[in-house]
Amino acid sequence: MDKLVIEGGARLAGEISISGAKNAALPILCASLLSREPLALANVPALNDVVTMRRLLARMGVEMHAEGATVVADAGRVTTPEAPYDLVKTMRAAILVLGPLLARCGEARVSLPGGCAIGARPVDQHIKGLAAMGAEISVEHGYIVARAARLKGTHLVTDLVTVTGTENLMMAATLADGETVIENAAREPEVVDLANCLVRMGANISGAGSDRIVVNGVAALHSAHHRVMADRIETGTFLTAVAATGGDVMLAGGEAGTLDAVLAKLAEAGVRCEASDAGIRVRASGRPRAVNLRTAPYPGFPTDMQAQFMALNSVAEGTGVITETIFENRFMHAQELLRLGADIEIEGNTAIVKGVPRLTGATVMATDLRASASLVVAGLIAEGETVIDRIYHLDRGYEALESKLSAVGARVTRRR
């Protein structure tokens, strides 16, 4: 199993190109199921989750053609409207085929999802919404089994804000009969990117980016070209790495407008970030100041950046209080940071992080995707060698991470 070996203490300088967003590419790939005509996508990241999604769609009968960061998905013939356990177990996003399959084929059989072990992430809102649109749904032997001759537009109010739930219902509604209103919709930029792609395919959608999305169903969607948005979590992770280590790095293609909450906290920490059409330039020197943060649905502080800021607070001046409100099991990285010399106390869903002057290298284990990223940030600032085991998590969400960091001066190598 691969591991990362990091020799800490290097100052970062230069330029990093930001990849396409995993959390936008995955639902947009699923959107290809809604049309009999090809969907051409640019800026698709080379990630394990993307490869898994392409394999899943291919098993359903979708013709997949990939060249570099360009992927063309042709769902002219969907032969098997099923997402089996062996492909779904490592990737929660596979649930996103449910709505498109039901809308396009009138049936779907989708294994209950897997993914990172960061707490309960139920799919009841997906099922409740599709049932309200007229689907007959049951859970049989670990699979969601759904049927509907044609979905009917309706007024939906989700019990909680759910990104994948919003995306699934929005995709299903594009081919439904009549108008569907989704209240309490997720506002994340990835939801907006999916909506933009669907509109290019001929869907009638308004309100994406707000908590009320209106979809008027159409008879069919057509071919389209779409460029996947830049990955805001990858951008935020590199911003945090530079903030922790010091340096001057241009994040080419980074979109500041999707990172307001993160940039505000970096400003509090004393880090200079300058946004332009070309990307975001981040400059830092000396120890950052500790910051308090509370995760929340967009546009609040993203839960996917909580772990990286815990690493940053570990070497900051002062004490930072981090409150996690999205997932109940997302402080597993704290124990690994303690192995590097961090001073962290966990009280329920709150972490109290007292900054220390330095961390020291050790062997640590990644427990989930963003925890892996926090350990990379910590390893970059720790004295001596840090070895991060189980980095297959990183390969699910970060494209060529060690290469990008090495290009700006980090001492990072991958070993088996």
Image (spheres, rainbow, N blue to C red):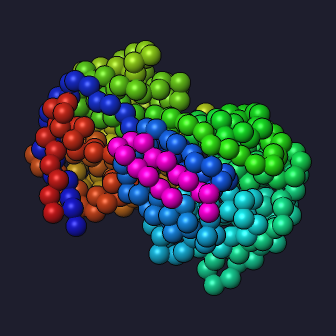
Residue drawn where x is 25% and y is 21% of the image:
248
The x, y position of residue 201, in whole percent, is 67, 40
Type of secondary structure dominating the magenta stretch: strand
Q: On the image, which quarter does residue 275 sit in?
A: top left
Q: Is residue 323 above or below residue 75?
A: above
Residue drawn where x is 23% and y is 49% of the image:
341
* Residue placed most toward the observer, 35 or 359: 35
Whether residue 45 is visible: yes
* Residue placed most toward the observer, 257 or 224: 224
The x, y position of residue 1, in whole percent, is 22, 67
Residue drawn where x is 16% and y is 44% of the image:
412
The x, y position of residue 166, in whole percent, is 69, 49
Q: Is residue 147 above or below residue 239?
A: below
Q: On the image, which quarter does residue 62 sit in?
A: bottom right
Q: Is residue 402 above or below residue 409?
A: below
The x, y position of residue 141, in whole percent, is 63, 84
Q: Which range of residues does the magenta coloring cover?
A: 63-77
- Residue 72 magenta: yes
Residue drawn where x is 81% and y is 45% of the image:
218
Left or right of 254: which side holds 192? right
Left or right of 7: which side holds 341? right
Whether residue 115 is visible: no
